[in-house]
Amino acid sequence: MLRNIQQVIIIDSITNNYYVLDSTHTTITAYSYSKQIIWKTNPRRDNHLPEYRRPNPVITYYQIGEYSNNRVGNLIKRGEKVISIGYSNSQFGLLVLKTGKFIFLGQD
């Protein structure tokens, strides 16, 4: 069990938008440079991911980057900025920075 979890903030250095992983490590909120909410999502809940290995997994990996392959067809374009996320139950996926759309990539 994770204890003393705090918010985690990552910043897009090009747009200066920032992305806040809340203190429960379940919900991500995107803010513009002017502090306006762009989108908010709990990827597991909002996309109805099934329970896997444990009942309430939290996000343990959270990193901004560019999508670099064509593995998911036309759901996302190569070079598009994303947040890669991984859960404590080994599920993982991508969030599109512009929209907050979650793309489930799998579990291991």
Image (cartoon, rainbow, N blue to C red):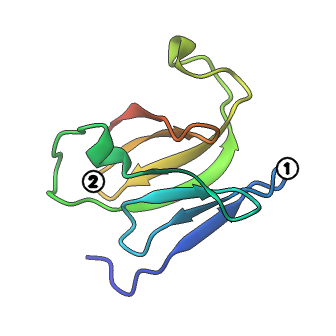
- Indicate left or right for 59 with 78 as reference: left
Instruction: Kindly indicate the quadrant of the structure image that contains residue 77.
Output: top right
Note whether residue 108 is visible: no
**Which residue is located at x 24 percent, y 39 percent?**
49
- Disc 2 versus disc 1: nearer the observer: 1
Instruction: Kindly indicate the quadrant of the structure image that contains residue 35.
Output: bottom right
Residue 16: % across, % down = 80, 58
Disc 1 marks which residue?
Answer: 14
Work out whether 6 lies above or below 74: below
Work out whether 59 lies above or below 8: above
Instruction: Kindly indicate the quadrant of the structure image that contains residue 102.
Output: top left
**Which residue is located at x 70 percent, y 56 percent?**
32
Q: 101 or 8: which is nearer to us?
A: 101
CB of mark 2 within 8 Å of CB of mark 1?
A: no
- Amino acid carrying label 2: it is Asn
Give the residue furthest to the bottom: 4
Which numbered circle lies on residue 106?
none
- Amino acid carrying label 1: it is Ile
| SS class, disc 2 | loop
Residue 41: % across, % down = 42, 50
Q: Is the C terminus in the top left, top right, bottom left or bottom right quadrant?
A: top left
Q: 28 or 89: which is nearer to us?
A: 28
| SS class, disc 1 | loop
Q: Is the N terminus in the top left, top right, bottom left or bottom right quadrant?
A: bottom left
Q: 92 or 23: which is nearer to us?
A: 23
Compare marks 2 and 1 and give the one earlier in the sequence.
Answer: 1
Residue 81: % across, % down = 69, 38
Disc 2 marks which residue?
Answer: 89
**Which residue is located at x 76 percent, y 60 percent?**
33
Note whether residue 27 is visible: yes
Mark 2 is surrounded, within 10 Å at the Cα level, by few (under 14), some (14 to 19) or many (20 or more) other residues, namely: some
- Indicate left or right for 64 with 33 as reference: left
